[in-house]
Image (cartoon, helix red, strand yellow):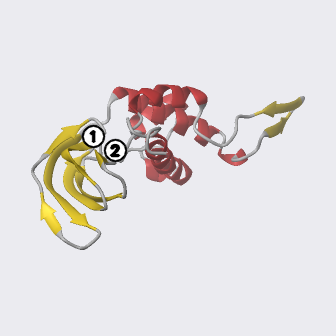
Amino acid sequence: MDLVEFADIKALLSLDGDCFADYPALETIADSVSAAIEVYLGRALELMERTEQFSVPDPTRLIPLDGLPVASVSSVTLTTNEGSSSTTTEYAIANFGIQLLSLFSGGVVTVVYTGGLSTVPEWLKRAALMQTAYEFQNKDHIGADYVSIEGGSVGRPALSLLSEVQRMLNPYRHPGIVFWQ
């Protein structure tokens, strides 16, 4: 999923080229920012079919999934530690993944589902655009805490998502990110 459109970054940075291919570093940075945002959100953003397995050592009903929001579930298979498997239809789609209608423990839950975003929302476009522009403008000093300039030096934030970008993304982090960490 491309979070930054070239036309937007071109307008913001007053670039002369016509596409990302004209700026290989920019294309690499845009891809890197997309990956960093997914990691920060604790979510896989692109809408697609996924298969995830979740180990369940203790009794639970909560099965967190990466591709949020969950659009549909094809199957939920419960496999006990003894090796017996069964498919269940006793679950509900929830904001964090799925919720089993009865407790399960001592095994693995395998969920085949479709989840993620069908379009890039404006809040995500803005956050990715800000981070991409910042990293591209500072690409010659990646990882530097201070940069010497004419007349002194400039302090820079640590190599991570900008504070403002994190603030914009916080409401959209995976609902279980604190609970399961």
Image marks 2 and 1: residues in contact by CB distance under 8 Å:
yes
| Tag 1 secondary structure | loop
Mark 2 residue type: Leu
Give the residue drawn at x 17%, y 68%.
85
First along the sequence among labels 2 and 1: 2
- Secondary structure of the residue carrying numbered label 2: loop
Residue 51 location, x and y as percent?
A: 25, 59
Residue 129 placement, left or right of 137: left
Residue bearing the label numbered 2:
45
Could you tell me if residue 14 is visible in this image? Answer: no
Tell whether 11 sits left or right of 157. Answer: left
Going by the numbered disc 1, the residue's amino acid type is Leu
Neighbor class of circle 1 (other Cα within 10 Å; few <14, some 14-19, many 20+) is some
Q: In the image shown, does 57 or 48 lie closer to the viewer? A: 57
Residue bearing mark 1: 117
Q: Residue at x 22, y 56 (%)?
A: 111
Q: Please identify the quarter of the rendering in which residue 117 is found.
A: top left
